[in-house]
Image: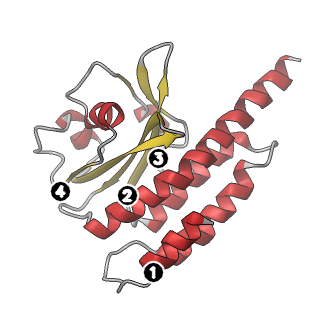
Amino acid sequence: MKFLRNVAGLLGRSRSKGSPDLAGLALDLLRAGRVASRPDAPAESLGAVVSIVAKSMQADLCAFLLFDESAGELITQPGAFGPGGDEEDLYRMHVTNRRSSSVRVFLTGEPFVTGDAQNDPRVIQEYARRWECRSLAVVPLTVEGRRIGVMRVGSFQKDFFTPEHLAVLDLIAEEAVVLVETALLGQKLAEANRRL
């Protein structure tokens, strides 16, 4: 409910060209919640959330990187990069690599945005160029005060993300973390059932 109230508040603001589709986002996240809660479709859940985020933010790339405590790494989850994404580009980033904007956001909890990822020294430019990403936004995923990872959203356009996009990304992160945890729990349960 808090999410819907926050979206309603943002909807009250004037919507500029290129700003996120908040009404569609709210409906899509509710649908994703239904998918994530289905025990027969855990693998589809993260991909559904990624697609919803990318669509509502009018972004070209989207990924969830979740913290693997045993490896000390942020790991890109399957389903990343939304429609037409390339699963071969999934990567792992050790949390000691402070060159990574994702690692810095994970460690500090502070969002990161750049309008020129391919030339910004705060970004590992090799990845930005590989994915043709010009603009990049990274926000923390937090559950009950504990960070579990980050959400990365990118655009092929330079200087794409506005303050309105960041406000929406913060809202999405609050809700998406519940869907991500539900999807991961579903995957673990499905794996346990297969082993039995």
Q: CA distance from mark 3 to mark 1?
A: 30 Å
Q: Nearer the viewer, mark 2 or mark 4?
A: 4
Q: Which mark is residue 115?
A: 4
Q: Which mark is residue 11?
A: 1
Quarter-of-image position of residue 32: bottom right
Q: Which residue is mark 2?
A: 60
> Which label's residue is closer to the chain start, 1 or 4?
1
**Crowding near pointer 4: few (<14 within 10 Å), some, many (20+)?**
many
Q: Nearer the viewer, mark 2 or mark 3?
A: 2
Q: Residue at x 43, y 32 (%)?
A: 90
Query: CB atoms at circles 1 and 4 under 8 Å apart?
Result: no
Q: CA distance from mark 1 to mark 2?
A: 23 Å
Q: Which residue is mark 3?
A: 85
The amino acid on which the numbered mark 2 sits, given as a three-letter code, is Asp
> Which label's residue is closer to the chain start, 1 or 2?
1
**Crowding near pointer 2: few (<14 within 10 Å), some, many (20+)?**
many
Does 102 appear above or below 163?
A: above
Quarter-of-image position of residue 194: top right
> Which label's residue is closer to the chain start, 2 or 3?
2
Q: CA distance from mark 4 to mark 3?
A: 22 Å
Q: Nearer the viewer, mark 4 or mark 3?
A: 4
Query: Circle 3 sits in a helix, a strand or a loop, which is it?
Result: loop
Does 32 appear above or below 181?
A: below
Q: CA distance from mark 2 to mark 3?
A: 9 Å
Q: Residue at x 31, y 83 (%)?
A: 16
Query: Circle 4 sits in a helix, a strand or a loop, which is it?
Result: loop
Which residue is situated farthest in the right direction here?
196
